[in-house]
Image (tube, grey):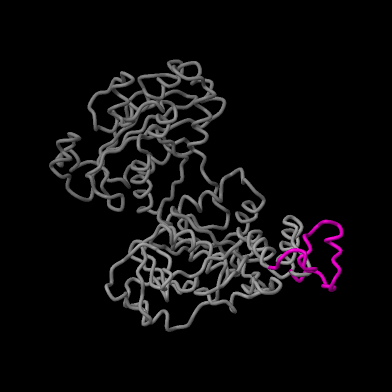
Amino acid sequence: MASIRRPPHTLFDLPQSMNAYTCANLVDGFAFVDIETTGGPAQHASITEIAVIEVDASGVREWSSLIRPAMRIPEHIERLTGIHNDMVASAPRFEDVADELFDRLEGRIFVAHNARFDHGHIKAAFRRIGVNIRPRVLCTVKLSRRLFPQERRHSLDHLIARHDLKVGSRHRALSDAQAIWQFWQHIHDTFPPRQIETHIRELIARPTLPPYLDPTAVDALPEAPGVYLFYGENDIPLYIGKSTRLRSRVLSHFNADHQSDRELSLSQQVRRIDHIRTTGELGALLEEARLIKSLQPILNRQLRRNRDLCAWRLDKDLAGPAGISLARPGEVDFHHPGQLYGFFRNRRAAVERLRALSAEHALCPPLLGLEKHTPGRCFNHQLRRCRGACMGLEPYADHHARVEAALAHLKIESWPYRGAIGIREGDALHVVENWCYYGAVSNEEDAGPLIARGKPAFDFDIYKLLVRWMERQLVVVLRPDGAAGDDGVPRLYAPLTDEGSG
């Protein structure tokens, strides 16, 4: 049977600031919670003791109960907590106290030290009996860090010593819950109520899940790198995103205040969430770019597929006028791209950018193909907008050098290897050639069959990712058959030498 203990305090014992804060701003109050366990995971019935101190407008009430776990308590845990196997042999199981515990937690802010542990075990225990609880959770470790940033350590033992808290038996649920409650009273005697309230509201900010979304879909998300996909009615792709912490990122979309119209629209439309785990951030970025191009979700604004992508290609022949033309990615060998600059989303954007550079650097529009060339005449030169290269007043070589300088910040990187490489990230090997991403494999032997499927289309977003990441990731140079290089030794990214060796 659960033991009910009479409250040692009343509402009038509360500091005046706490009294006002509790009644005015958090009407349903708080539940200061602590549990003891066998040391086993939350997925098993490992709770051995639960304590709750309820604080609300009616006063302060304490409750605690031993719990019979589904496994024996290890000897070292017995020594730590003082809870022995014979003490819990006749104690109620969790399901026997679940209704009473639910009532004590319902509507209140769940306060615990290292709250992820206590909340995780209690939530899992409720789930095993078919009950889903989603309280607002406040971790006093995080609150202590906010209020006492000058302190390095915030364990319960350190809080007890630092703030002279009075506790009975350490590592017993009720004593530890009382310590948390004393810490709460202490901070309200120390800090202005508004400062505490601000920190609490930020720490307990809990997303409101969309009405049509199954809560278990969010619970199943890991705190790991990957890509998440939101689907609406009829399984229409709504939005695709990536994160190194999938669950936290997904929940951030559903904040109650909705930071943008897009977030609000997403919350109203989403019906299903799917996810793909990756071994790291690069894999998540690459997979996000690939999926957005293929699925075209309606709420993604960036990384959209662009069939009109183009770049300016500059002729190296300095003997005549500096010829310039538009090139498509499919027409370019990135091993030897020559002088390639861009990319631009379409021909119009490319021409507008070149026209702006021409005006800024006093280049000759006829030689750039922006205007019709009339021999012996140049309207721009008459207006002193160019140096007259098309009339022979400026050497072609000088004009060409100025064109190169004007375009330099748009220069596209050459592919620095003879063939394909694999970029190491955890257990994955991302196979890339000519800035095109083939996919991920687990080892070098699997790269060959992946390459044999055919070269993927060039993607400018993936190109930008790879240029940035290859400078800090280990790569494996692959032979034409996709296997590792002759020595098989991973090496750092390095450009080809003048002789063309990697």
The magenta segment is 368-396
Q: Is residue 434 left or right of residue 75?
A: right
Residue at image position (51%, 50%) is 251
User: Is 318 located above or below residue 107 in the figure?
Assistant: below
In the foreground, 298 or 324: 324
Residue 497 coordinates in the image, percent (x, y): 41, 68
Picture quarter containing residue 373?
bottom right
In the foreground, 454 or 407: 407
Residue 258 coordinates in the image, percent (x, y): 62, 46
Residue at image position (37%, 77%) is 447
Picture quarter containing residue 87?
top left
User: Is 437 located above or below residue 164 in the figure?
Assistant: below
Residue 170 coordinates in the image, percent (x, y): 23, 29
Outermost residue on the left side: it is 75
Q: Is residue 62 left or right of residue 298?
A: left
Q: Is residue 448 left or right of residue 264?
A: left
Q: Quick one: quadrant of the C terminus?
A: bottom left
Principal secondary structure, stretch drawn in magenta: loop
Q: How many marks?
A: 0
Residue 347 coordinates in the image, percent (x, y): 72, 70
Residue at image position (40%, 64%) is 494
- In the image, residue 447 lies in the stretch drawn in magenta: no
Residue at image position (27%, 73%) is 487
Q: Is residue 401 left or right of residue 495?
A: right
In the foreground, 301 or 115: 301
